[in-house]
Image (spheres, grey):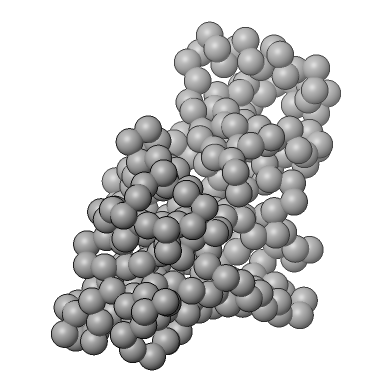
Amino acid sequence: YDFSGSQWFLPLVPAVELTRILRDSFSEDHPTKLVFSIGLYGRGIKFMMVDMLDGSVFAGCNTKLPSQFLPAAPDQSTSEAREAGIVRWFAEYARRLEDGTYVERALVPSEPDETQGISLFPTKGPDYSVAVTRGVEVSASSLFAPELPAQGWAYSIALRLVGTKEERGFETCQLTTRTWNIEFEGERPDTIHGDGVIGLFPILRDGGWICDQDSDPHGQYNEENTTIEGEFRYQSCSQAAASMKGHFGGTVKMVPGRSRKPSGQPFDATVAPFRLAIPEYLF
């Protein structure tokens, strides 16, 4: 899990220079493409390209062959669609910013002050889900990630308390285990059980979560006995599959109080299924 990623738009001069550097790698398949955006994701490099002749947009990465680069906007089979490809790509990106599908937040949850940016994890649509169980709200979303060769998607899961402690029956509760149900078309469902989430066992409270030795035993947040404001959020990856069409959901076990000092019976908070698919637009 020890990597982060971010995508940048390039000014024209750096775009031309980078395209020249990469041309030896993909010029035979994409001789008329210009790289206009690049992102670093661990050892993966993703770049967006526009065809300077017809305006179509493609997503490529260093983990794929040039022949495997993907269209980044739909309906590019006609000349009219190709000409409008880059315009429609930017228009769709702007629409998602305007309607709140993409929002500004910390791209690395444990480094909120240093990593503010536009998150490509959606907050609505088929790649997003939300469910509330006994006052624990769990929202989740996926992001297709072709630059990660062993995975197909990154996903983001956030938890927070809603309602009042009187309505919930507890003031705090701690995540102890997770159960994921992953199902792809034409394949047997896969069920995964584990302790915590990426080594964390968050203790939720109104308005935030408690970060201490119980919730962060490995010191990922470099915080001691403090309340972190806002939802608890973490990000991870899910493996690809032959069909590249499926769903991801499951439950997280919550213990009222703390796991070492419970104040009620454990319960399963639902992670409603969200889609795993190759979307029409790639950003």
Rendering quarter of residue 92: top left
Residue 200 place in picture, x, y as percent: 49, 60
Q: Residue at x 31, y 61 (%)?
A: 209
Name above or below for residue 73 compared with residue 190. Answer: above
Residue 124 place in picture, x, y as percent: 38, 62
Q: How many marks?
A: 0
User: Is residue 235 shown left or right of residue 131?
Assistant: right
Residue 72 place in picture, x, y as percent: 59, 42
Choose between 129 and 213: the one closer to the eye: 213
User: Is residue 236 shown left or right of residue 164?
Assistant: right
Residue 181 visible to an observer of this rendering: yes
Residue 92 visible to an observer of this rendering: no
Residue 215 place in picture, x, y as percent: 42, 62
Residue lying farthest to the bottom in this orientation: 265
Name above or below for residue 268 compared with residue 69. Answer: below
Name above or below for residue 144 compared with residue 112. Answer: below
Rendering quarter of residue 64: top right
Choose between 51 and 256: the one closer to the eye: 256
User: Is residue 250 shown left or right of residue 169?
Assistant: right
Choose between 135 and 120: the one closer to the eye: 135
Q: Residue at x 67, y 78 (%)?
A: 191
User: Is residue 32 shown left or right of residue 254?
Assistant: right
